[in-house]
Amino acid sequence: MDSEVMTLGALAILVAGGWLIDVLSHRGSSPLQRRMASQIKKSAETIRGAPLS
């Protein structure tokens, strides 16, 4: 019983640590995200300026 509790505790710490690292490493947007946002804006501008058929 005690080893099961220790195993679950260690797993919980491992998961929480992984989540924390993931959160801290994604603070800023990546270059890919910035390029995609820029492309979406350009596409939206093009669609807005397109003449209606």
Image: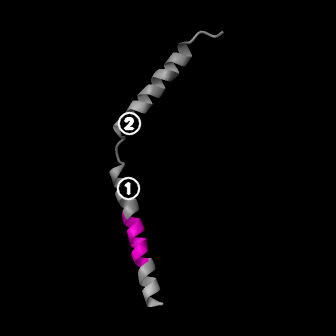
Instruction: Work out whether mark 1 precedes mark 2 in sequence or the reverse, and give the earlier one.
Output: 1
| 1, 20: nearer the viewer | 1
Q: Residues within 10 Å of mark 2 (few under 14, many from 20)?
A: few
Q: Quadrant of the C terminus?
A: top right
SS at circle 2: helix
Q: How far apart are the alpha carbons under marks 1 and 2?
A: 17 Å
Majority secondary structure in the magenta region: helix
Give the left or right position of residue 53, taking residue 41 as reference: right
Q: Quadrant of residue 10?
A: bottom left
Amino acid carrying mark 1 in the image: Asp
The residue lying at 44 percent from left, 26 percent from top is: 39
* Tag 1 near tag 2, CB within 8 Å: no
Amino acid type, residue under disc 2 in the picture: Leu
| Above-or-below relation of 9 to 52 | below
Occupied quadrant, residue 15:
bottom left
Query: Which residue was labeled with disc 1?
Result: 22
Magenta highlight range: 9-17
Residue at left offset 40%, top offset 66%: 16
Under circle 1, the secondary element is: helix
Percent x, y for residue 17? 36, 65
In the image, residue 4 sits, relative to residue 30, either above or below, namely below
Q: Which residue is mark 2?
A: 32
Q: Residue at x 50, y 19 (%)?
A: 45
